[in-house]
Amino acid sequence: MIDLKLKNFQENAVDFLFNKTTDSKAKPKIILQSPTGSGKTIILVAYIEKYLDYNRDDIICWFCPGKGELEEQSMQKMKRFAPDLKSGSLNDVISSGFISGTTYFINWETITKKDNVAIQDSERKNLFERIAEAHRAGKNFIVIIDEEHQNNTSKADDIIASINAKYEIRVSATPVKRAVGEFHEISEIDVINQGLITRFMYINKDLDSVKVDNPKNEAELLLEKADQVRKEIAQAYVDVREDIRPLVLIQFPNLNDELIEFVENKLNSMGYTYENKLLASWFSAENKDDKDRKSKKLGKINIGTSVEDSITNKNATPVFLLFKQALATGWDCPRAKILVKLRENMNDTFEIQTLGRLRRMPNAKHYGKDILDCSYLYTFDEKYKLDVIKAGGAFETQRVFLKEEAKSIKLKKEFRNFDAEYVDEQEIRYQIFQFFKDKYSLGTVPKENKIRLENNRFIFGTTLKRSYLTGKYSTLSDVSDENTQHGTMEVKISTHAHGIDLQHCVGIIKKLIGLSYDKTNQILKTLFREKFGNDKYKLLNLNLKEFYGFIINNIQRLKEDFSSFLEQTIKDNLNDKIKKLPEKIEEFSIPLEEYYRYVPYENNIQNIETNVYKEYNSSMITDDFRSTSERLFEKFCDNNKNVKYLYKNGNSGQQYLSIVYDTVLKQRLFYPDYVVQLNDGSIWIIETKGGEFQGESKNIDPQAENKFIALKKFSQKNGYKFGFVRDKNNELFINNTDYVQDMNNDKWIPIKKIFDIVPSDK
């Protein structure tokens, strides 16, 4: 490496990668978890340099995510820090083939998007042909997959499989929940201690409580606060004699030209314009929604066209950069210290990984001043999500084939009847009306009803009440911790600006009760809006803005109430009072072949002999794919002599066994977990659910009782046996009489007693 001394944690990572890729006993899949700002690219370049010193004829394929032109950045860093290494692009591969000792930087989107010449037949040899050509020449590959969690597409898997690398190195800043294969994690604290990233992240610093009259005031407030902090940082750099101009990133939720222009105008009024080059923008259409918007803001302004005038330079002129999502992954600009994340509606979720863009220290050192050693986020997003890679590409898929004798297993299956309207809307409206009346002791006078609902802590008024995250955090996981701080915010309702929020809330209720959006909205308006619908079902007389506020502010309460309503309909057998269409029936056969994920490198793999598929084995039922009750049940069946066959049903799809169950408002499908055939030919249909742990239920399915009723009815009608199976203290219990949640109830019986199965010596 030229003019660069690696930090200790970087050297350790290089040694780990080198040792694993030169050890014939190492697992071929390797995961490096490397926080943003830890010098991931430098680590990989140093590793490649060391590896090729000993394996000069091998080929490195370095796959980068398509956002932010990361492959170009990575290639430039290699040329800068390891100029003696040979590098190339996808075009070089297609035109000249793979050359030994070369690292090829390839953009994922280039090879996975539709209609791409790189993977289609053409007069040039395509990528797959070049890979085959290299294999025929006896060349070996190392594959590096950068930001690996973004590239789990079937087309990408095909390319990886065709390369058939000796080792795959998957690298990501995203936490890995369970790594399969070789795994090395660089601690965020180690990176902080070396001065490479900021010591802390401030979220909404000095924003303790907020009141705004207009949703656009949110953006104004955040922009003004960000500019204030930017000026403080700029002065602090001057004080320590650093020629660094801090950059504010402004992230938009989508290509909303109206919002973009509003922000541009606001910044212009503050003295930041495209003309004086203090303002820059970078917008691209990244998905169908973006393209459908036909934005006039696409393109780059004041980003720079060369290294000399690049916005990423420490003293570049622009101090505000407007962008959408493309910069969030892989874009490298250490002078970016502040992020303003705007939102389209109040249900946006902030992805915590985005904070990594702000954490790099421009000169890889701390200054001992909070204003310079921290990064700053300003956003009113209420939900924060820290993505976790559950498995990444570490799991593999195996095709298995149905055993010959199991082909004779035939069952009935049900599917929904869409031939006509399903429910009596008047009856549904009446039942919901009665539910609210009974639960909250409401009468026929809306004013009195409002008082009673207020007494039950429902919120009324024409302002939206929200909370937002505040505080000072050291690591990304701290931001997702439950012990975070919050500020409060009040926003005056705008029926135009908050229409999306209302739609979102109605959509939540719609999913619960199973009606269309329009019908759900009509019921809510009939119950709560003035001058709408039949007055005999009127609980409140809210005007339009009050209606918006009531639904949006109380959505969690309403969600709980409508869930309770559905539970009540089951107990009161209201399903029987509402006219429904009969379900449709057809024959079900077990699919002739199936694909199951499995954990490679699992020790002591054993075939599960009772399974209907050949080669179905214990690596397919680990806790990565199966719940505790499922794993216990499959092992229970495989170790009992009276079980002839066990079939694990799919979760959705026409090829699987489905049963119709009723909610009060619609037909739904569920797919029972297992079909069991005993040696006497009898068929059992089993649904597994979460059991109990320390007295608390692990069953999270609110429709469990409905499904139980449907499974019981279906099984009795068709001559099958059935049961719900749950676990408690690593023992299985079955219920095939009447559903109860409490596993202490005597309806939950040890499964051995019901199946009358004696453990065998298998």
Image (tube, grey):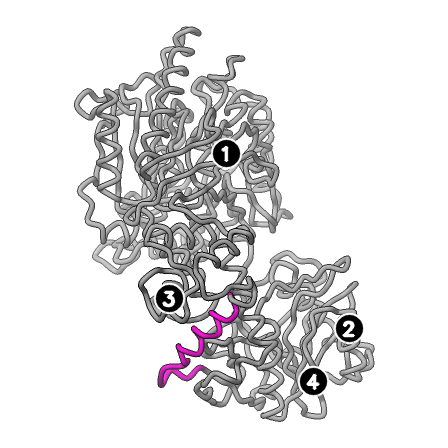
- Residue that mark 2 sits on: 745
Residues at marks 1 and 3, CA–CA distance in whole angstroms: 35 Å
Mark 1 vs mark 2: give the one in front: 1
Residue at image location 47% in from the left, 89% down from the top: 586
Front residue of this view, candidates 169 and 637: 637
Using the numbered discs, state the Cα–Cα distance from disc 4 to disc 2 in whole angstroms: 30 Å
177 versus 696 height, above or below: above
How far separated are the C-alphas under marks 2 and 3?
A: 42 Å
**Horizontal arrangement in the rendering, residue 163 relative to residue 714 (left or right):** left
Which amino acid, mark 4? Answer: Lys
**Residue drawn at the location 70% of the way across and 87% of the way down:** 678
Work out how far the residue at label 1 is from the one at label 2, CA to CA, in angstroms: 45 Å
Q: Position of residue 334 (x, y in %)?
A: 41, 24
Residue 524 drawn at (x, y percent): 40, 63
Sequence order check, earlier mark of 4 and 3: 3
Q: CB under 8 Å between callouts 4 and 2?
A: no
In magenta, the rendered stretch is 416-436
Give the spatial CA distance, label 4 vs label 1: 60 Å
Q: Is 441 drawn above or below residue 12 in the view shown?
A: below
The residue pinned by badge 3 equals: 526
